[in-house]
Amino acid sequence: MADSELFRKRIEKINALKAEGIDLYPNDVRVDDTTASIQERFEDADNDVLAGLNERFTLAGRLMAVRNFGKAAFINIQDRKGKIQAYLHRNGIGDAAYALFKRLDVGDIVFVGGRPIRTKTGELTIEVDELRLLSKAIRPLPEKWHGLTDVEARYRQRHVDLIVNPNVREVFVTRSRIINVIRSFMDERDFLEVETPMMQPKAGGATARPFRTHHNALGMDLYLRIAPELYLKRLITGGLERVYEINRNFRNEGISSFHNPEFTMMEFYQAYATYEDLMTFTEELLTSVAKRVLGSLNFQYQGMEIDLTPPWTRISVKDSILRYGGIDPEILEHQGKAYAYARQLGLEVKDTDALGKLMTAIFEEIVEKKLVQPTFVTLYPVEVSPLSRRNAEDPGVTDRFELYIAGKEIANAFSELNDPEDQRGRFLMQAKEREEGNEETHVMDEDYVQVLEYAMPPTAGEGIGIDRLVMLLTDSPSIRDVILFPHMRRKEPGVE
């Protein structure tokens, strides 16, 4: 039967029930139990134990299946914790309630009260003595034998996706657990959770194109933040010393399996620490999360065996290119040769690009995807690290790392640049690139430079992509699988 026909029949049924004075959306019940609490308590109880119970249990959830046998029926009820079977018979709930039950549909929300029993097949079941309709479903769920499998439909109708695909609900339960473990880890180490502005007068803290909005009362343009970095470092300067924020960032960029315009990151900053300290810290943090959430440091991601056992590999950008690219070392010493090689790889680079920028582009093309096991890639060129501290031994690179797992960047960290004169020079260098057409570079931020002039202590900071971490630990192939409501292209009217 077509969905439109099912919808029409549901409307007819609802109108008939309303005409009989039946309340289709009551709100006067209290639920004491869940499917899981009952199953956990009585999973090993035999019939004798269950027969001796004097307790009555109540639960509510969505009607997911009905097997009708005339004067009796088995149903499956699904709540936030899972599913359980229930047994109804006319003598147990009364003629009126049973007559109402016969007019219910899969997808309706129901309340049941009763006691646990075991069926002849040994399945724990609620023998129902009370049944009530709590909310009538007008639209039918996808047919049970194929569920909601169309990927685009799943993302657009996440509410239905969560109903019919239990594994999807489990992903988001795991996501919540991951964030809770991270918070506990940070709190135990004396980090203070803070909130910084989502709308900022200047888009800074990362290299990305921002979203712009306008504040009418103030008469000024504002930008949805691309990163909280510059505000968090203001707090470090103010003496908070250890801060973190878990929240949304917004970048006006393309959409892919690893990119969403709105995404969640944790950024944290620690005074009197270096990027090397944060490598050890990151190992401890992510192994703690994996142990708590997965119970192991070894797991599979999209067919790749991942082992988080420390210590993780540490290698510089330059050395990683030589190791994984197998190229002539001279290419990475001369701007012209690096440009020619980048063009040979098909990269969109300019002949005026600095050597460090060319080297980074080559790294991203030939090395990133090969970093399957956790790897800290260190010493990024100054040209691509406008907020990072220069390395004391080689001022052409910075004290920075990016963490790669399964070929994707998971974290970015560095010893913070706290020299205001150097920072102003970096901003000016970025401003020149912006004049040349690169809209993703930093704008000149004199206010932030003034912050540094009040003396920011030596500090290290890091950003960790929460969505990508959840993808990794739930074996999810797309970022849209771990964001409840991912951004989608507008659906054209009349297009299914």
Image (cartoon, helix red, strand yellow):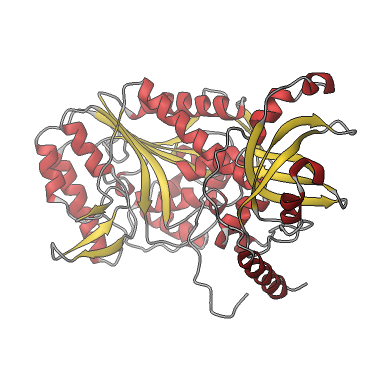
Place of residue 73 in the rendered image (x, y in percent of width and height, measured from the top left): 82, 47
Q: Quadrant of the C terminus?
A: bottom right
Q: Position of residue 145 (x, y in %)?
A: 79, 57
Give the quarter of the image for residue 89: top right
Residue 412 seen: yes
In the rendered image, residue 27, in percent from the top left (x then y), is placed at 52, 49
Residue occupying the far bottom of the picture: 494
For residue 336, what is the image quadrant? bottom left
Tell me: residue 168, above or below residue 2.
above
- The answer to which of 280 and 381 lies nearer the viewer is 280
Q: Residue at the location (42% across, 26% down)?
A: 184
Left or right? Give the position of 421 relative to 312.
left
Residue for point 48% across, 55% down: 259
Given residues 188 and 364, the one toward you in this image is 188
Q: How many marks?
A: 0
Q: Nearest the camera: 262 or 287? A: 262
Q: Residue at x 21, y 28 (%)?
A: 240
Q: Is residue 330 left or right of residue 131?
A: left
| Image: 95 above or below 56 | below
